[in-house]
C-alpha cells in the first residue's frame, strides 16, 4: 500500500468504487481505496438493485439519470451490471393517481421520459398484477435493474486500470489533522499521507465521522426483501419491468424466474445497538413477522405470490437520514474530509451520479449541480442527537411510500426550537410548520374571520390542502395596515476583524464598502457565477457586519463564508442566531406603529430605506433594519432574545388600534411572489447567475475583483440564454407547487421554480426560467398542473409596486 495518495476513498461499495472511477477519470492517479472487508462486501453485496430515476428534486433526479447513463456502459468479466427493463409505478388510490400525473409532468420538465398509462396498457407490460383497485400507472422506459456488485467491480477495476490502488482487508482506524485540514489516514496497514479523504462508508459513516469528532446524521434501518418463486409465468424470454405499488407499500423486480418482493413497512426497525465496526454486520436474521404486512400487500398486487416458495430472505442494514435525502459534501470542520452516504435505499440508483458529482466537486472545488438538498451543511445541531435521528428517520421510513404532498409537515420530533414569542403565537392560534427544528407560524387561525367576504379562491387540489383563508387576511394586513411577523428563526451571523470589509468585498457580488449603518442585499457567488448564498449584510461598524439569511441556510452559508476566510486570522465569522429575536413589522402603518413605541425618529428622512439603527422600542434595546421581504414599508427588529417576548407585546399592543395582525410564513410567500423577491434554493441557486436570475442590480462589477466576477463578465459579454420570468396562470385557483412544466405547444420550455397565489393582484403566480426569446411580457404559454394544461402569460415583473414606492415611502 502506498504511504502517500492524492485521495483516499474509504469503502469499496458501489459508492466508493464510483468515486474512485470518476476521480481517476478526471486524471487523479494516486487514489487509494481502503476496504476493511472484501471488496464490494457491504450493503452493496445484497441490494436487489431496482434503479429508479424519478425523485421529487431536480438535482437528485439528474444524479440518478447520470447513474443510468453510466451503468449502461459498464461490464465486469464481460457481464453487464445493468438491464434497462423499465419500471411501472401503480396508482391504487385516487390520491396516488394525482401524484402520478404530477410526477409525469415533473419528469418531462427535467427531461426524463415518463408516460402515464391506463390500467390495461400497464397490465400488458406486467400481466401478473391484479387490476383490482388499480387506477393507472406511470411508466419509465429507461429505469432498470442493477447487479450492484458487478457495477461496483466494473468501476473499481476501471479505476485500478487508471492507477488507483484497491486495498481490501484494510481498516481505517483514525486520522491525522492539522490546521483544520486532513493530513493523514491511519489504517490497519499503516498510515497514508493525503489531503483528500472521501468516506463512502455506508452505515459505518457515523463511526468514521466520530474519529474526527464530526456528526454524520444517519441511522441504519433493517430493510428486508424476499426472493419468491420460481414462477412458470416468468420462464421464457424478456424481463418484466420493475413494479412499485406504493399504496400497498411494496416493490417487485424479476430475477430469472423469481421475483424480488420488498417494501417499506409501517413499523420499521432501526439498529438498536451501536454500529458495529466488525467486517460485515449488514445482514441480520430475517424477521418474518415484520415482513408479513409487506407479503400480504404483495399478494394483493400479485395473486401469484399466494403459496409461492421463498428462495431467499434478506434482512439488510441500510442508512436512513432524518429528511430522507443523501448526505454529500465536505466537512465544514475538517477541510479535505468528504462524505457520500445516507442513501435511504437508493445507493445503487444514486452512486453513479453521486461519484461523478463528488469527484467533480473535489477536483474543481465547486459542486457541479445544486446539491443543497443533499448537502452535509443542511443539518442543525440537534440532528446529532440519537433520539432525534431515530424518531425522525423512522417517520421518514414509515411514510416513505405515502403520497408526498409539498408543504406537508413532519409529526415526529417537533417543538424543538421555540422563539421567545412562542406562547403568544400559540394564544393567537398559530398553525405551525417546522424548519430546521424551529416551530414557525404558517398562519394564524384567529385571522380566518378577517378573510370573510374577500372572495379569494381556495387553491384547487393539492395546493388547497394545507391552506387557510387566514393566509390571504395576513397578506392583506401587510398590504393595507400593518402585520407582525415572528422571524426569530432567521439565521444570523457576524463577520468581524480587521480584514472583514476587504474579505466581504471579495466574497460578495454587491458593494460592501458603504457607510456604517447601511444594509446591503447581496449574493455570494461561486467561480461559475452561480449563486451560493443570498443574504442581507448590515455594516454595524467599520469592520463588523451582521449577516442574515434564511432559517435553513445558516449552516450552509456560514460554511461557505468560513471556507473563504483568510488564513491570517484577520477575520472571524460566527453564528449569532440564538442571541437575537427578530420581529418583522411591515405595512403602510408600520412607521406609525414604530413611532408609537419609541423615542427614536422613524421618519423617512431620519431612517431611510436600507439603513439600520440602534433604537429602543418601549423598554427594549433593539437594532432596526429598514428592509423588507414582503414589499412594504417597515423594519426587521432584532433584540436580545430575552427581550423578544416584551418586544412582541409592545408592538402588538400599540399595533392593535392600527389594525395590526399577526402573520405567518405562508403570507410572506404570497407577498414576496407579488414583489418578485427570489427564494434561494428554488428560484436561485448555485446553477444560476444573478443576471439570468434578474438580480443584476445587486452586482457591482466596477467595485474590484470578487469571486465569480470573471464568469459574470463572460456571461454579460455572451448575452443571456435564459431568464427567470414571472407568469400568471389564467385560472386563479390553479396554483403551481413547483416543478411543473412550462410549455409552448409540445415543447417544454422550463419548469416552475416557485408558485403561489397573490392575494393583492388576485392572480396565480408562477416563476420559472425561460429561454430569453420566450420571456417577453405578453408571451402566451401553458403551465401543466396534474396533467391539465392551463393558459399562462409572461408578465412584466414585479406584479406589485414595480417602482418600489411602497418600500421607500
Ligand atoms: C435490503 C436492501 C435493499 C435495497 N434495495 C435497493 C434498491 O433496490 N435500489 C437501490 O438503489 N438501493 C437499494 N438499497 C440500498 C443500497 O444497497 C445501498 O444504498 C448501497 O449499496 C450503499 O452503498 P455504499 O457503497 O454507500 O455502502 P456499502 O456497500 O455498505 O459500502 C461501504 C463500505 O465501507 C466499508 N467500511 C466501513 N468502515 C470502514 C473502515 N473503517 N475502513 C475501511 N472500510 C470501511 C465497509 O466494509 C463497506 O464495504 C438496498 C439496501 C438494502 C439493505
Image: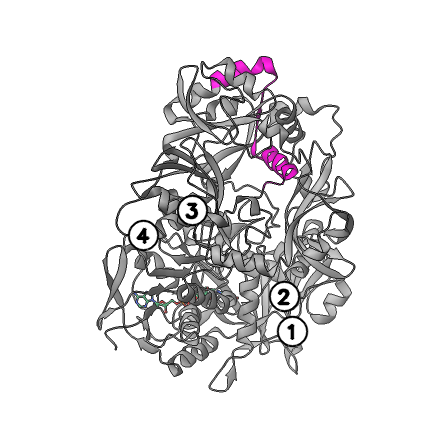
Mark carried by residue 557: 3
Q: Nearer the viewer, residue 474 or 778?
A: 778
The range drawn in magenta is 649-677
Q: Which mark is residue 240?
A: 1
Q: Position of residue 57 (x, y in %)?
A: 57, 55
Q: Kindly report the secondary structure that dominates the magenta region of the rendered protein.
A: helix
Q: CA distance from mark 4 to mark 3?
A: 14 Å
Give left or right: position of 270 versus 739.
Answer: left
Q: Is residue 630 above or below residue 389?
A: above
Whether label 2 touches label 1, CB < 8 Å: yes
Q: Quadrant of ligand 1?
A: bottom left
Q: Secondary structure at mark 2?
A: strand
Alpha carbon distance from label 2 to label 1: 8 Å
Decide if residue 107 is in sight here: yes
Name the residue beneath numbered marker 2. Answer: 243
Q: In this rendering, which labeled residue sits more in front, label 4 or label 3?
A: 3
Amino acid at each position: 500500500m502506498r504511504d502517500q495518495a492524492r485521495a483516499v476513498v474509504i469503502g469499496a461499495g458501489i459508492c466508493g468504487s464510483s468515486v474512485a472511477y470518476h476521480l481517476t477519470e478526471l486524471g487523479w492517479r494516486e487514489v487509494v481505496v481502503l476496504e476493511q472487508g472484501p471488496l464490494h462486501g457491504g450493503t452493496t453485496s445484497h441490494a436487489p438493485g431496482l434503479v429508479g430515476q424519478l425523485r421529487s428534486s431536480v438535482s437528485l433526479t439528474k444524479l440518478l439519470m447520470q447513474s443510468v447513463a453510466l451503468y449502461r456502459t459498464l461490464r465486469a468479466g464481460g457481464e453487464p451490471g445493468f438491464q434497462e427493463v423499465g419500471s411501472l409505478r401503480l396508482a391504487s388510490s385516487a390520491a396516488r393517481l394525482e401524484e402520478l400525473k404530477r410526477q409525469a409532468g415533473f419528469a418531462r420538465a427535467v427531461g426524463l421520459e415518463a408516460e402515464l398509462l391506463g390500467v390495461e396498457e400497464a397490465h400488458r407490460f406486467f400481466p401478473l398484477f391484479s387490476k383490482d383497485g388499480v387506477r393507472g400507472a406511470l411508466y419509465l422506459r429507461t429505469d432498470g435493474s442493477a447487479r450492484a456488485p458487478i457495477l461496483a467491480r466494473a468501476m473499481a477495476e476501471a479505476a485500478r486500470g487508471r492507477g488507483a490502488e484497491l486495498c481490501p482487508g484494510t481498516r481505517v482506524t483514525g486520522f491525522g489533522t492539522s490546521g483544520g485540514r486532513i493530513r493523514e489516514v491511519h489504517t490497519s496497514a499503516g498510515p497514508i499521507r493525503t489531503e483528500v479523504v472521501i468516506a463512502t462508508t455506508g452505515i459505518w459513516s457515523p463511526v468514521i465521522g466520530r474519529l474526527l469528532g464530526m456528526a454524520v446524521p444517519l441511522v441504519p434501518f433493517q430493510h428486508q426483501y424476499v426472493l419468491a418463486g420460481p414462477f412458470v409465468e416468468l420462464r421464457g424470454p424478456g424481463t418484466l419491468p420493475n413494479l412499485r405499488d406504493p399504496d400497498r407499500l411494496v416493490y417487485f423486480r424479476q430475477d430469472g424466474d423469481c421475483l424480488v418482493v420488498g417494501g417499506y413497512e409501517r413499523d420499521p426497525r432501526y439498529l438498536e445497538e451501536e454500529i458495529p465496526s466488525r467486517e460485515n454486520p449488514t445482514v441480520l436474521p430475517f424477521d418474518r413477522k415484520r415482513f408479513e404486512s409487506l407479503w400480504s400487500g404483495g399478494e394483493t398486487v400479485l395473486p401469484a405470490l399466494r403459496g409461492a416458495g421463498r428462495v431467499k430472505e434478506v434482512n439488510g442494514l441500510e442508512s436512513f437520514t432524518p429528511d430522507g435525502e443523501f448526505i454529500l459534501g465536505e466537512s465544514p470542520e475538517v477541510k479535505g474530509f468528504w462524505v457520500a452516504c445516507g442513501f435511504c435505499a437508493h445507493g445503487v440508483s444514486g452512486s453513479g451520479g453521486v461519484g461523478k458529482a463528488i469527484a467533480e466537486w473535489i477536483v474543481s472545488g465547486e459542486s457541479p449541480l445544486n446539491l443543497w438538498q443533499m448537502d452535509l451543511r443542511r443539518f442543525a445541531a440537534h440532528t446529532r442527537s440519537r433520539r432525534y435521528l431515530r424518531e425522525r428517520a423512522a417517520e421518514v421510513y414509515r411514510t416513505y411510500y405515502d403520497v408526498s404532498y409539498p408543504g406537508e409537515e413532519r409529526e415526529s420530533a417537533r417543538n424543538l426550537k421555540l422563539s421567545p414569542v412562542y406562547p403568544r403565537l400559540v394564544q393567537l392560534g398559530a398553525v405551525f410548520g417546522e424548519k430546521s427544528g424551529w416551530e414557525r407560524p404558517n398562519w394564524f387561525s384567529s385571522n380566518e374571520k378577517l378573510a370573510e367576504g374577500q372572495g379569494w379562491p381556495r387553491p384547487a387540489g393539492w395546493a388547497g390542502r394545507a391552506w387557510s383563508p387566514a393566509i390571504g387576511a395576513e397578506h392583506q394586513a401587510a398590504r393595507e395596515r400593518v402585520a407582525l411577523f415572528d422571524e426569530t428563526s432567521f439565521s444570523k451571523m457576524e463577520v468581524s476583524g480587521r480584514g472583514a470589509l476587504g474579505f466581504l468585498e471579495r466574497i460578495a457580488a454587491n458593494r460592501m464598502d458603504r457607510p456604517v449603518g447601511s444594509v446591503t442585499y447581496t449574493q455570494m457567488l461561486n467561480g461559475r457565477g452561480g449563486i451560493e448564498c443570498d443574504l442581507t449584510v448590515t455594516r454595524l461598524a467599520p469592520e463588523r457586519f451582521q449577516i442574515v439569511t434564511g432559517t435553513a441556510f445558516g449552516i450552509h452559508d456560514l460554511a461557505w463564508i468560513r471556507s473563504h476566510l483568510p488564513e491570517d486570522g484577520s477575520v472571524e465569522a460566527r453564528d449569532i442566531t440564538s442571541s437575537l429575536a427578530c420581529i418583522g413589522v411591515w405595512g403602510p402603518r408600520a412607521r406609525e406603529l414604530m413611532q408609537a413605541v419609541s423615542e427614536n425618529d422613524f421618519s423617512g428622512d431620519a431612517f431611510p430605506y436600507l439603513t439600520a439603527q440602534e433604537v429602543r422600542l418601549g423598554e427594549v434595546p433593539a437594532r432596526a433594519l429598514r428592509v423588507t421581504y414582503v414589499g412594504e414599508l417597515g423594519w426587521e427588529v432584532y433584540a436580545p432574545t430575552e427581550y423578544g417576548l416584551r418586544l412582541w407585546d409592545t408592538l402588538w399592543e400599540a399595533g392593535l388600534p392600527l389594525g395590526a395582525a399577526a402573520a405567518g410564513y405562508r403570507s410572506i410567500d404570497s407577498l414576496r411572489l407579488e414583489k418578485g423577491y427570489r427564494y434561494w434554493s428554488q428560484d436561485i441557486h448555485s446553477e444560476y447567475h444573478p443576471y439570468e436570475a434578474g438580480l443584476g442590480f445587486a452586482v457591482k462589477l466596477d467595485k474590484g475583483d470578487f469571486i465569480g466576477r470573471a464568469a459574470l463578465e463572460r456571461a454579460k459579454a455572451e448575452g443571456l440564454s435564459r431568464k427567470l420570468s414571472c407568469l400568471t396562470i389564467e385560472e386563479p385557483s390553479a396554483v403551481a407547487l413547483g416543478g411543473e412544466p412550462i410549455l409552448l405547444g409540445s415543447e417544454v420550455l422550463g419548469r416552475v421554480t416557485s408558485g403561489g397565489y397573490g392575494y393583492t393582484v388576485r392572480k396565480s403566480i408562477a416563476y420559472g426560467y425561460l429561454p430569453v426569446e420566450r420571456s417577453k411580457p405578453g408571451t402566451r404559454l401553458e403551465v401543466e398542473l396534474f396533467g391539465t394544461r392551463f393558459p399562462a402569460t409572461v408578465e412584466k415583473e414585479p406584479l406589485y409596486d414595480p417602482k418600489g414606492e411602497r418600500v421607500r415611502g
